Image (spheres, rainbow, N blue to C red):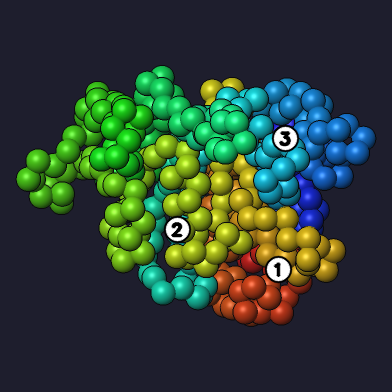
């Protein structure tokens, strides 16, 4: 039995995490869910959306999965997601992006992963006012954090049978900060024997490295997303491009995410809490279920993860039991029940 922290979150979080638990149980993995509350529901009692007992639970169990948690815009408390990453040093954000046959999309055969440095860049939150006439945010890029995330990306590329590892940056303008990120990318890739092509045919190489300026990356991800494999980048670019990529394959309701550190890992649905539909049992639980698939692979339960993945492929191809956002009329519970049925067959 595994002890895993569960943070249901806000809004539709209770509904989608309930569906996820049902599907994981049907996969055959025995999990003791240690459920802890975070988000809007605990602010009045604890004066924070992230009470210390939540962090204590994750530190003890080493693994957590969470539903969406609302963040006030422009004021109030800091993002729970950012606070979790900083407090637990979850330095690598991993978002696989794949097309599912049966989900409406303009694209086919997309299979790429965004790897985002999670602890610094503008998300370090170092800001101050200059009198009452300006505000400054400081962009922090360090050699240590860059080396760590690029090493993670190199390992991920090799371990998941990808070929192309791309560094996304803006070093043509931010020559010091992004320049450091790009230089360390080249150095760490060379240490891992992932070299630039230098005129060679990509087909002749098992792995290769290249770099793409962030605005060009955004354009090319829309034009030819099938050409990309693994993209590693600083925090802000990763936040933006991972959502862009989600739009290529059906939206944030589909995409899973993992935040991985040396000692702990937190898996999460990256979509919002959707308070406007909370309690109606119509939310799409695919993102949190796919995040659970990532979690099961992380703990070595690969067969169970594959069972859920196969059931997801079948449910989308059949197209009979889909939630409203996917063009169907099924409830959250009906979608989860159908996945469980498909795993039994």
- Residue under pointer 1: 335
The circle drawn on residue 4 is 3
Of circles 3 and 2, which is in front?
2
Rounded to the nearest whole Å, what is the CA distance between mark 1 and mark 2? 24 Å
Picture layout, residue 59 above or below residue 19: above
- Residue under pointer 2: 245
Which sits earlier in the primary sequence, circle 3 or circle 2?
3
Percent x, y for residue 299?
A: 58, 35
Q: Locate the N terminus and report the quarter of the image it occupies.
A: top right
Instruction: Assign a secondary structure to mark 2.
Output: helix
Residue in front for this viewpoint, 9 or 263:
9
Residue at x-position 45% and y-position 65%: 248
Percent x, y for residue 274?
A: 73, 61
| Crowd class of label 1 (few under 14; some 14 to 19; many from 20; radius 10 Å) | many
Percent x, y for residue 265?
A: 60, 32
- The answer to whether residue 165 shows anywhere in this view is no
Rounded to the nearest whole Å, what is the CA distance between mark 3 and mark 1? 24 Å
Which sits earlier in the primary sequence, circle 1 or circle 2?
2
Relative side of 57 to 209, left or right: right
């Amino acid at each position: 039995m595994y002890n895993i922290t569960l943070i249901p979150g806000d809004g539709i979080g209770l509904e989608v995490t309930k569906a996820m638990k049902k599907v994981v149980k049907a996969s055959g993995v025995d999990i003791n869910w240690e459920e802890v509350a975070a988000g809007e529901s605990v602010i009045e009692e604890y004066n924070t959306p992230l009470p210390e007992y939540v962090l204590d639970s994750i530190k003890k169990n080493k693994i957590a999965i969470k539903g969406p948690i609302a963040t006030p815009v422009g004021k109030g408390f800091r993002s729970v997601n950012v606070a979790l990453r900083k407090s637990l040093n979850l330095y690598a954000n991993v978002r696989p992006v794949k097309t599912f046959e049966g989900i409406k999309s303009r694209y086919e055969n997309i299979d790429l992963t965004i790897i985002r440095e999670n602890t610094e860049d503008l998300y370090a939150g170092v800001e101050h006012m200059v009198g009452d006439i300006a505000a400054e945010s400081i962009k922090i890029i360090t050699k240590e954090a860059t080396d760590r995330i690029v090493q993670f990306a190199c390992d991920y590329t090799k371990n998941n049978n990808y070929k192309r590892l791309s560094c996304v940056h803006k070093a043509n303008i931010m020559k010091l900060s992004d320049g450091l990120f790009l230089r360390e990318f080249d150095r760490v890739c060379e240490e891992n024997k992932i070299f630039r092509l230098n005129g060679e045919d990509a087909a002749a190489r098992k792995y290769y490295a290249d770099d793409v300026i962030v605005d060009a990356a955004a354009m090319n991800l829309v034009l030819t997303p099938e050409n990309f494999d693994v993209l590693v980048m600083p925090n802000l670019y990763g936040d933006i491009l991972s959502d862009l990529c989600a739009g290529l394959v059906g939206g944030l309701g589909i995409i899973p995410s993992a935040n991985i550190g040396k000692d702990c890992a937190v898996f999460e649905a990256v979509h919002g809490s959707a308070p406007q539909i909370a309690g109606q049992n119509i939310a799409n639980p695919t993102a949190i279920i796919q995040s659970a698939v990532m979690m099961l692979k992380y703990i070595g339960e690969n067969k169970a993860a594959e069972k859920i993945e196969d059931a997801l492929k079948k449910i989308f191809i059949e197209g009979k039991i889909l939630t409203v956002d996917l063009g169907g009329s099924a409830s959250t519970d009906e979608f989860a029940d159908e996945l469980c049925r498909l795993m039994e067959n």
